[in-house]
Amino acid sequence: MMKRTATRRAVLGAAALLAAGGLVAFGGTAQAQQSFKIGLSNGWVGSEWRTQMIEEAQAAAAAWKAKGVNVEVVVQSATVDVQGQIGHVRNFINQGVNAIIINPNSPTAFDPVFAQAKARNILVVSTDAEVSSKDAIYVGIDQKDWAVKSAEWLAKTLGNKGNVVTINGIAGHPANEMRVAGYREVFAKHPDIKLLNQANADWDQAKGQQVMQNLLATYPNINGVWVQDGMADGAWRAIEAAGKKDQIAATGEIRKDFLTRWSEQKLNSGASVNPPGVMASALNVAVHRLMGKEFKDGIFKGQYGNAIYIPIPFVDNSNLAQALKQAEGKPGYWSVTAVVTPEEAQQYFK
Amino acid sequence: MSAVVRSRPWLLTLIALAVLVAVNTALQPSFVQPAVLQSNLTTFLPLTLVAIGQTYVVMGGDIDLSVGAIAALVNVVTVSAIAAVGGDGLTPIIAGLAAGLATAVVCGVINGVLVAVLRLQAIVTTFATGIVFAGTALFVLPQAGLPVPEAFWRSYGATLIGLPVVLWILLAGLAFALFLGRRPFVAHLTAVGGSRVGAFQTGLSLSRVRIGAFVLSALFAGFAALCLTGETASGDPLLGQSLALSSISAVVLGGTALSGGSGGPVGSILGALVLGMIGNVIFFAGLPFAWQTLVQGLIVLAALAGGVLVTRR
């Protein structure tokens, strides 16, 4: 029985492989002049945000067809470690793609393999997390500015004074460190804002809730909470459970489920948006570059001098209804998003 | 035929590898180009090395779940040592290699002593020491970074006497495995894994043999870490997390029984290459991304089950 199942699986697998192989061969012959192949690599499959990121990039690629540009995307998405993701990049290089767009698992480990890609004349664009390689560019948000925006909202909401706690992601993670630097810079400008505690909850919603419970128990006089991403959902649950939702202002997050609760419970919240559309934005920039356009001088910023920062939308009570409208008909895990359109991407080029 | 296969289970792995190579070449005609072969080998090499070391532990009836963490620790120790010595030339690189491999040996001795001398269960012990090693790696280098000198990763990607360095490393690993296979150590190890009581009654020093296996495993994890350092040109404390279970899969795919007492590293090398090729074929088949992990799991399962079923009959 077991053997038969294994055989059937093998047969099914072989059939799928053959069918897929046929499709690849067919796609290969349909090359027109304005036709590009772009590899998308995602090294972590732990949240719906990443799935939405890939789906939006695929949609953006399909949309280029209306402009007479044929953009074929090849996706590799799995939870891999760094060498696994280097394998992704190698496969793309060996396949002969025109560009690689990657949400990288490490800021530094891709330097040699990106150099190989560059040597083969492949454009490499990292998104969502910056990379140190001089052979790649970054298109995405400035994580520090993301934190500055929400910290400024919190300071303003609190009238520039009060007791604040923060809940951060994974200590040592590059994006986390940039965000921490961002809110510290803002709060340092307001001497009447007192940072009582800065905790870590590893970007885990349940941990965020637990940490918030502890903080509420330890400090009865909290006025404001600065908390990142999905952990905000957990933190708000703890605040609501403690019956303090009307006394505390806290940053929020951007998934539809939270926006709905935010609106129903009339929470005092505001959220910087790290849009899942970053990969689609990177793709739109990449296609312009592949069509031979040159980047404007002085466009690259950031610590590695290779970053194009895209706008960071912000949701607060003034435009919450609008965000909810955008989320209409979408599943609960859907995140508020924004994409740099092909027309907007034009501004980065000469 | 059946007897031939049963005494050499790696023959099946070799056939599987040949099939995968054929399928991959059909899907991706450029596969046989030297540059593409080299790039594939570079991707597969770390797992292959770890699998060689893991084989000795498994042959002795134990298991080593800490190899991934050892690789991460060796990686960060190596880059930190290179940065600490500083300067150009070969001195910092040699210091880094020495510090990294010494770290690996220490990890292996710790595993071996805990398992063989204190008689703790190998599976839980190495799971726990793996957490300790991973924590130590985070302590040594809290955040990914510290680039290594260009000479380091350039020579890893270079060619030597007409062949890529990565191929030389693989051949050296194979040569070591064949050499050790003719030494009494492997015979002792097979005896220890096959029948611990019997081996003890013949007067073998069980703990020395088992510690030796754990040191070999750690040392090969160390070699893999040096290859990864050559590939990534930097330190990353979160490196190698998938190495432990993948290496055990490679060992089993190569025909070494998890119960110990039989098998050998040549099969594990083939097993590791098969695992790597499965990932390749999945990619070049152009499956939708949501299916890639599932199909890969099913093929690995079929390969493992196929080997077991054929040798059982």
Image (cartoon, rainbow, N blue to C red):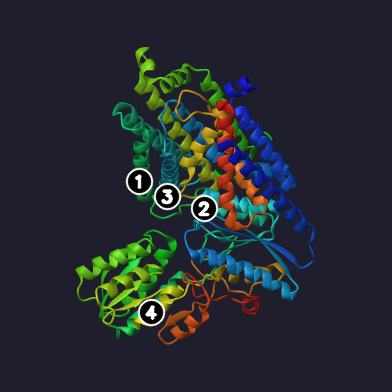
Residues at marks 2 and 4 on the same chain: yes
Circle 2 SS class: loop
From the viewer's perspective, tell me whether residue B245 is left or right of residue B155: left
Look at 75% across and 46% down and name the residue there.
B29
| Residue that mark 1 sits on | B136
Using the image as rendered, state which of residue B45 and residue B146 is in the foreground. Answer: B45
Q: Mark 1 touching mark 4, by CB under 8 A? A: no
Give the x, y percent position of residue A208: 33, 65
Look at 44% across and 81% down and name the residue there.
A315
Looking at the image, can residue A103 be seen?
yes
Query: Gap in Å between the C-alphas at discs 1 and 3?
Result: 9 Å
From the viewer's perspective, tell me whether residue B224 is left or right of residue B141: right
Looking at the image, can residue B44 be seen?
no
Circle 3 SS class: loop
Q: Quadrant of the N terminus of chain B?
A: top right
Look at 44% across and 39% down and name the residue there.
B67
| Residue that mark 4 sits on | A262
* Badge 1: chain ID: B
Query: Gap in Å between the C-alphas at discs 3 and 2?
Result: 11 Å
Give the x, y percent position of residue B199: 39, 16
Q: Mark 1 touching mark 3, by CB under 8 A? A: no
Count neighbours of disc 3 (C-alpha within 10 A) and say few if under 14, some if 14 to 19, many if 20 or more: many
Look at 47% across and 18% down and name the residue there.
B187
Q: Which mark is residue B237?
A: 3
What amino acid does circle 1 point to? Thr
What amino acid does circle 4 point to? Trp
Q: Mark 2 touching mark 1, by CB under 8 A? A: no
A339 w.r.t. B12: above or below: below
